[in-house]
Image: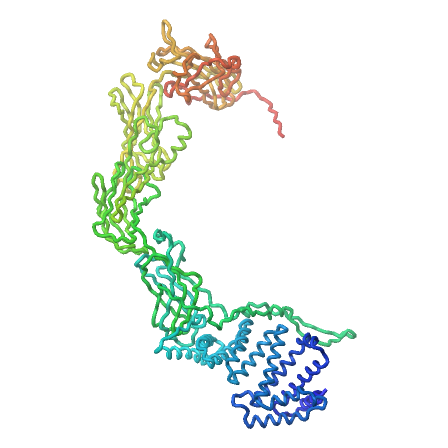
Amino acid sequence: MSWMPCFLSMLSTLVLGVSVPPGALDCWVFLSCLEVLQRIEGCCDRAQIDSNIAHTVGLWSYATEKLKSLGYLCGLVSEKGPNSEDLNRTVDLLAGLGAERPETANTAQSPYKKLKEALSSVEAFEKHYLDLSHATIEMYTSIGRIRSAKFVGKDLAEFYMRKKSPQKAEVYLQGALKNYLAEGWALPLTHTRKQLAECQKHLGQIENYLQTSSLLAGDRHLTEDEREHFCREILSFARRQTGSPGHKIVLPMHSFAQLRDLHFTPSNAVVHVGGVVSVEITVCSQMPVPVPVEQVAINVHFSIEQNSYRKTAEWLTRHKTANGMVSFPAETSPFPTSRNSLPALELYEMLERSPSDNSLNTTGIICKNVHMLLRRQESGASLETSAGVTLEDGAHVLKCTDVTLEPGPNTITFQTQAKEPGTYTLRQLCASVGPVWFVLPHIYPLVQYDVYSQEPQLHVEPLADSLLAGIPQKVKFTITTGHYTVKNGDSLQLSNVEAMLILCHEENRAVIYSNTREKASDASLRVQSSDKVTSISLPAAPAYHVIEFELEVLSLPSAPAAGGESIGLGMTEPHGKHEDTQKAGQRMATMDHKVSIDCPWSIYSTVIALTFSMPFRTTHSLLSAGTRKYVQVCVQNLSELDFQLSDSHLVDTGESTDLQLIPLNTESEQRAHSRQAVFFVWELKWTREPPPSLHCRFSVGFCPASEERLSVSLKPYTCEFQVENFFTLYNVKAEISPPPGVEHCRTGALCSLEVSITRLSDLLEVDKDEALTESDEYFSTKLMYEVVDNSSNWAVCGKSSGVISMPVAAQATHRVHMEVMPLFAGYLPLPDVRLFKYLPHHSAHSSQLDADSWIENDSLSVDKHVDDQLDGGSVQSRGSVRTAAGSEHKGLPMPRLRALPPGQAFNASAGTQVLVIPSRDDHVLEVSVT
């Protein structure tokens, strides 16, 4: 091969350390690469050559690089061509090549001829260099090595720039720049960008040159002097164009300055029409020197929603940040992938040993994740173009003029007066330096402020959790003026409610707050009241302010109609109501007072409802002690407050002169604790026979049991109720005796029980019913007695119930004897003795009382011997009335029992106990445990 002697000659020269002229080694490498490639082409067909491009393209690239080096050395790339020194160097190099080998002398395109021709003239060099460069780029591209193709293109760009052909160099510089951006090579990117700036300047691409200059001015890989140079390029261009304003040059802002944060005043970013909103932004200048900016502007998009005038400041504030501060993410790096975010190198040692003796032949390092580190990112968008950056021109703009941006953070404040209600969205940030506008096209995250126009509003609410009737309590009035200006002479006109008073005090004052809840002033409040209207004079207040004042209201207790059964303040509940009503009575009843208010800003009246809770609930009962009668009134405090009760009175509304009401409560004042009851008792004394019923009115003074109670006048609390059944007709007395000869009753031993039923009065009007019978000598009535022991202390042996015929005459007595057995030792209460009216079976249903007061016993049978009709079992401990004959009379009309009203039967043995001692007999108790 012809290149081999040359190769051996150069190799011996290098080994022996003999110096060679500049360019000789490049000539030898160029000829060697082309000789190898020519030999390959001679022994392979086209398909084989194409399939092996990946192995030969390196030789093409190396030959191109060496030819470029020779061109620079020989002055073939300069604009003026080679000088005499360059020509002498070229002659020396050609002479050193010697004569061409005979085997290639007849070849038209031998490497020797190509090199000699390329060095012979500028045009020939350009032709050969461009052919080699383009061929190398195509081969790199065909095998997918785009990065290498871009590197060769960058060398071409440098060649074109030296040849003063910037229009041809630009495309290759942009390609290299895109590649560096995609792969994150910062320093090559900066160097290429400098070359591109020079190219754009020569081409007169003002907008692109200014954009590249702004990027270089903010590039910290350059020296300060270089950065200042590019910054002053922008400022000098802006000064030159000041006198002749023309087309605006719009550039991206990210290279000029970066938006860091934004702060609203007021912090909720909500203002009323006519209010002032302040927007403070912090921008970080990327420039190395102070830059005078003619104007910094924020383009604002205005939108209005349907019915937005109904939105209040409170509603709008719920959708805002708490402190009014909005932070913006840092500007993304110009590189799509940060070097820090790439995976770590996975390096492994590679050893190759001889199969025969296991000796080490080669060693090296291999990276197993190279595919992750060198992935192509061609799709990354280049930041060198300003395509898509447009300057909005809207009607709403926030402006700040004559601002100097110092290097680093700068604070800029915008102020504007709200004129129209709606939502204002900050869309675009702009900064103008002469005709050059740096634009942040989209402010993200979304930043908005709202302007509202609010109607005047009146709100009335109690200061406490709930209002209690009967005591003075404060109510807070809040007036939001909205767009209305309150003038001197404006007032609220409140319609008076009969059962509610508005208390007037001279010390009433109103406080005026601004829209941001800052106290503006206070003023005295004049309240005037007449029979129908209460007038409240309002202090003067500007629009979008708040007026607050407090007034005392009092809901008067109202007395119910006689015999009513409603619960609440002034209501009573008769004894013996149903259980569900009693449970409901534990909750405070309420009453609403509706007040109509006329406001000066509206022709319509505002109706408010104040709900008052009833603090008390009353019940009454009639108590008996023999023939003496007592009325007990229970006042239960249902509220959470303690009250002081005093001056209790009970009067007969019929003003009977035959009745005396003697109070038994000795204390003049009593404390009604929260959720507790207080009892008042009066004894009833008549000088003549009492009437069938008595109408009473109960009243008591009360006030909160606090230290200020003496300053609050006591408010009377009244209720009315009706009392019936004043007569005690029967006295029932039970007595248990031990067996004869024994001092005390013993468990398991039969004892004697004697029940005495005594009539206390002659015939009265209440006795005239179906049970009353008349004989020649006296009247009599039928009663049923029943002995029961609900506590299971006694076992009733034999007959435990029966029907007696009781003479209706004073002191008439009927005695019943039976046997009982104590089941336990100790002091045992006596069994209960109950009395019922025994009505015959032929009594008409229409004349019966309410079904709830009747006890129907279908087991009773009708017999001529009424004393023996009812016969209990041998032993009954629960007192249930049963007979074996009940089933025989099923379907026949049965007698009915009616319980005596409270007070008509007095149990004289109530509370009496009998001592029972244990039996002396010893018993063995067998217990089975499973």
Question: Farthest residue toward the right?
Answer: 356
* Quarter-of-image position of residue 347: bottom right
* Quarter-of-image position of residue 98: bottom right
On screen, 373 above or below 848? below
Question: Farthest residue toward the top?
Answer: 776
Q: Nearer the viewer, residue 537 or 419?
A: 419
Q: Nearer the viewer, residue 803 or 139?
A: 139
Image position, residue 456 (x, y; %): 29, 50
Q: Is residue 425 left or right of residue 507?
A: right
Q: Nearer the viewer, residue 476 or 643?
A: 476
Q: Is residue 60 left or right of residue 334?
A: right
Image position, residue 790 (x, y; %): 48, 23
Viewer can see residue 81: yes
Which residue is at 30% across, 34% downward? 645
On screen, 692 above or below 486? above
Q: Which colouring convention does the figure follow?
A: rainbow
On screen, 722 above or below 216? above
Image position, residue 407 (x, y; %): 41, 74
Image position, residue 695 (x, y; %): 29, 24
Viewer can see residue 187: no
Which residue is at 27% across, 45% downward? 604
The quarter in which the N terminus is drawn is bottom right
Q: How many marks?
A: 0
* Quarter-of-image position of residue 436: bottom left
Q: Nearer the viewer, residue 421 or 606?
A: 421
The quarter in which the C terminus is drawn is top right
